Amino acid sequence: MFSAIIKAVDLPVPLEEFRLRALAWATQQELAAYYNPNQIPYPHDGFLHLLAISDSAPLALDEANAFSDLRKTLAAQPGLLCGYLGYDLKNQTEKLSSSNPDHVGFPALFFFQPEVKLYFNEASISIYSSGKSIAAIIEAILATVAPAPFAPESISIRQRVSPEKYKSTVARIKNHILEGDVYELNYCMEFFAEQVLLAPLPLYLALNEASPTPFSGFLKYGDKYLMCASPERFLKKRGMQLISQPIKGTIRRGETYEEDAQLQHQLRHDEKELAENMMIVDLVRNDLSRSCATGTVQVEEMFGIYGFRQVSQMISTIVGQLRPDKVLADALAAAFPMGSMTGAPKISAMQLIEELEDTKRGLYSGAFGYITPDQNCDFNVVIRSIQYNASSGYLSFMVGSAITYDSDPEKEYAECLLKAQAILKVLGG
């Protein structure tokens, strides 16, 4: 293993330009994962600022037995793993199924062992390589042209669900709530485009520029790409501590400081949003208690209001201590998928989601992140994200909102459009 810490002052180009060149160099490899916290202050911090690359095949994990196979893999202490858990792994945590069409084609489970890792800090870069020399890597990066953020010419974006159908489905969900099937359900719809030709990395840079978040990321898996601007953490493990931070509650940013403060105050005191957040906090507490020691699951912060570039969000933080007889894979399986993207009760909500939605969620509302050599991890919730299949030219993103009995279909639809705003902007919509 080769390693080096290079100070920014020793680079022949500015550190930011080196980072961009490194990203462009990474996209020439078969597998690349990039995690960017955007220097945003966040409780328990955001992602590590990490770029991971490999030209080898991903891990041969058994999709049909994902969590048990992941458990065996981690027991062998494989080192750093980068990848994701697709939403449809729900079918392995509960007796569920998925039959809606999937047009992007990401597998349900994906992890790889990077051959090159770059950790970015404010004044230096730490580089690790299991093959090429550090000098050869730096030379290759410096020989690569730095990309610029680029929003493509207007792409013809279509909605899988019409406004009328969306609103009528919300009415159906409210009937299910009235009948006692669920208390809350996260209903999502797809925006898509076909026969699209674009450069994924400049698009990701444009998305991150428009909507910087603490769990931003970029993934290249062959011809498939994820461009992610997620503000939400699914699960972080640090030692024996587990941390989950569901988001429920969204409002637009104000044009002035005074208007923004008023809107955030409005969100913090909105009874519907508070009820939604509380329901999901209870659900996440229950999920964590399945792998945590009795009495250790606590709500560290309730109804915290955090402002991002496009929206303000209501975020709660739940923590717990992993039981000594449990390992990371147990914690992931017990909490997956994130309750904020399902509803409550969780199993009933996921059954209804499959019935009511028109698109297989796939990677959307799954979890993208990394597992460290010491069996710690950090995973986001894949929302506010673009998926792209370069071979077929299919581009997709999904948005949704939590439906309760008090939901107004018009307002829920408007919330979906608000969440889609940054992506539509960078796609020229």
Image: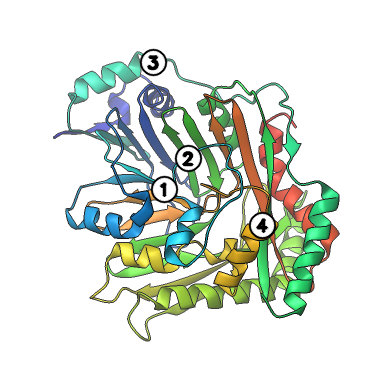
Query: Which residue position holds label 2?
Result: 106
The amino acid type found where label 3 is placed reads Thr
Whether 282 is drawn above or below 242: the answer is: below
The amino acid type found where label 2 is placed reads Phe
User: Element type at marker 1?
Assistant: strand
> How far apart, in angstroms, are the residues tagged by discs 3 and 4?
37 Å
Confirm or deny contact between disc 4 and disc 2 (CB under 8 A): no
User: Element type at marker 2?
Assistant: loop
Query: Which residue position holds label 1?
Result: 84
The amino acid type found where label 4 is placed reads Ser
Of pointers 1 and 3, the one earlier in the residue sequence: 1
Query: Which residue position holds label 3?
Result: 144
User: Element type at marker 4?
Assistant: strand
Confirm or deny contact between disc 4 and disc 1 (CB under 8 A): no
> How far apart, in angstroms, are the residues tagged by discs 1 and 2?
10 Å
Asked whether the viewer can see residue 270, the reply is no
> How far apart, in angstroms, are the residues tagged by discs 1 and 3?
28 Å
Of pointers 3 and 4, the one earlier in the residue sequence: 3
Q: For the C terminus, which image quadrant? A: top right
Front residue of 258/93: it is: 93
Disc number for residue 312: 4
* In this rendering, position of residue 199 left or right of residue 426: left
